[in-house]
Amino acid sequence: MSTLLGKVAVVTGSGNGIGRAIALAMAEAGAAVTVSDVLVEDGERTVREILALGGSAIFVRTDISVAAEAQNLIDTTVSALGGIDILVNNAGMGGSSARLHEIEPDDFDRVLDVNLRGTFLCSKFALPHFLAKRDGRIINIASTYGIVAAPKSAAYCATKAGIIHLTRQLAVDYGPDQIRVNAICPGYIDTSLGRRAALLSAEELVDASARREKAAAMQPLGRQAQPSEVASVAVFLAGDGASFMTGSIVTVDGGCTTTFNYGEASN
């Protein structure tokens, strides 16, 4: 594909999972990519994978919740790659698995800072570059948990819902400047539980994986998605094929938000 040929994309949280898949897909579509993550080894691995495909990429270690680091991410991209055309706000975290009264305020704040403040900061520093040329694309990775609630996920659900409405608000403010802002809401994605896996015992990991598989089997398509299936939607939203889409909230969830789940998979 060459749908993003000549474009420069920043993808946060692209050392693993969905972010890594998006960075690879955008590079395959022709974009030069800035890979960003707090995990240096993982981010540098994504860069090596892009270079091995014949693409162009750099790595910038970034904690997106810190204003100076978010600004450095954008500034370094512009300096090293000649500009910025696409921002994918993918980096995020899940937070504590607990009911709200059991969550420590610092834990809630950390999820808010990474998921919602990080999306705000990266967008804030990218937007002046988009405004200068009256062109730009922001793709926010939200979640189906921003549309429907889930047990023991108060901070995560609240921040993802915030990202969804921030997407709509940015679309309203910046549409007249030809800047398109859309969001993707993934459902169950096969990322081997991502970074959460490292925090679980072997028994907990098996149990959590089994619960995800069971839940995914109850959705209309009856399976988890591969990260590449989210990445292909991100590439579409970044390209000219989505030129009349802004403020759109695109679910990539196997149909899970379209129907009431009765608690058992169909035979």
Image (cartoon, rainbow, N blue to C red):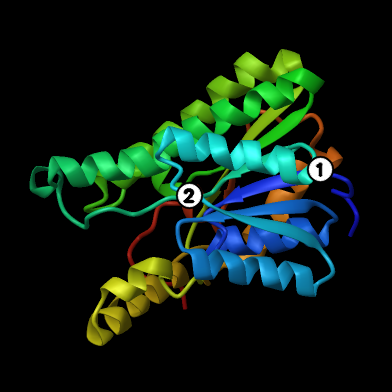
The answer, for residue 13, to whether it is visible in the render is yes
Residue 210 location, quadrant: bottom left
Mark 1 secondary-structure assignment? loop
- Please tell me which residue is depicted at 74% across the width and 30% down the height of the picture: 136
User: Where is 131 relative to 76, above or below?
Assistant: above
The answer, for residue 247, to whether it is visible in the render is no
Q: Nearer the viewer, residue 159 or 67?
A: 67
User: Where is 235 relative to 192, above or below?
Assistant: above
Residue 38 location, quadrant: bottom left
Q: How packed is label 2: few (under 14 Cα within 10 Å), some, or many (20 or more)?
A: some
Query: How many numbered marks, from 0 up?
Result: 2
Q: For this view, does 129 lie left or right of residue 6?
A: left
- Please tell me which residue is depicted at 88% across the width and 46% down the height of the picture: 6
Residue 169 horizontal/vertical position (percent)? 54, 20
Mark 2 secondary-structure assignment? helix
- Nearest to the eye among marks 2 and 1: give it: 1
Residue 199 location, quadrant: bottom left
Q: Quadrant of the N terminus?
A: bottom right
Amino acid type at circle 2 is: Thr
Q: Nearer the viewer, residue 261 or 27?
A: 27
**Disc 1: which residue:** 239
- Please tell me which residue is depicted at 32% across the width and 38% down the height of the picture: 112
Q: For this view, does 199 lie left or right of residue 243?
A: left
Q: How packed is label 1: few (under 14 Cα within 10 Å), some, or many (20 or more)?
A: some
**Disc 2: which residue:** 257
Residue 117 horizontal/vertical position (percent)? 40, 34
Residue 186 horizontal/vertical position (percent)? 53, 54
